[in-house]
Image (cartoon, helix red, strand yellow):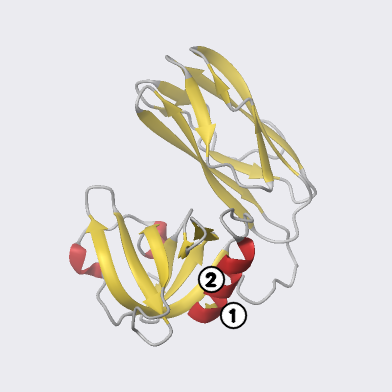
Amino acid sequence: MLVGCSDDDTPTYLASVRVSQSFVTLPESGGTCDIEVTAKDSWTITDVAGWLTVAPAQGEAGTYTVTFSADKAYGLMTDTIFINCGGQRQDIYVFQEAKNVVKPHGETPADPFTVAEAIAKCEQLGATTDGVTYYGKGKISSISEVSTSYGNATFKISDDGTDAKALTCYRSFYLENTKFTSENQIKVGDEVIMTGKLVNYGGSTPEFSGSVYIYSLNGKTK
């Protein structure tokens, strides 16, 4: 087992790409973790957060050692990167956490952003996420889609329950980061605490996007 890597080293297999593990945990002090990627076709790695380095990020058919690395952590850092190969996508979940650190406002479920504060953070960050996991509290103001096929939902939240100053929650998972199984699991007016990365998509659409899920729904976390 490689130092800093996840204890869960069960291989994950798809038809076109295989990885030695799909969870990567990096040490608080900074460091690296290697996984093995075996591809039957050319492949690329996408959606890598700014705090994380992944190399190589592309290749041809064959077996590769892919190295994940990060500097010292000052809070909980998470990312989901995608290995794209032969029309299939393998998700790799990356975690790095600094313990006994007092996190700033908006970075814990006990002290979440208001929607207005989350929107301001999106506008500050621009079109690129900073890799920090944020929390934001609001009311569902409209629902674009709940996909039971993909297990995710896209909806808006706001402080007052209207779409006037709303934040998009893009392809969010349900409570405990599980997939949606029914369109009736959420409704307009529900009070939620969301968690995920913040970004101002396209420079004009503030949203939770990347590792997004409902942390609490009407006060319940499960």
Kind of residue at badge 2: Tyr
**Residue 216 picture location, percent across and down:** 42, 74
Instruction: Give the residue type at disc 1.
Output: Asp
Marks 1 and 2, how far apart in space? 8 Å
Label 2 residue SS = strand
**Depth check: 22 or 82 in front?**
82
Q: Residue at x 32, y 61 (%)?
A: 154
Seen as rendered, the residue at the extreme top is: 62
At x 61%, y 49%, the residue is: 95
Return the residue nearer the eye: 136 or 200. Answer: 200
The quarter of the image holding the N terminus is top right
Q: Is residue 178 left or right of residue 119?
A: left
Q: Which mark is residue 71?
A: none
Which of pointers 1 and 2 lies earlier in the amino acid sequence? Answer: 1
Q: Is residue 112 left or right of residue 218?
A: right
Residue 96 placement (x, y as % from top left)? 66, 51
Counting from the top left corner in percent of width and height, residue 71 is at 77, 46
What residue did someone put label 1 on? 111
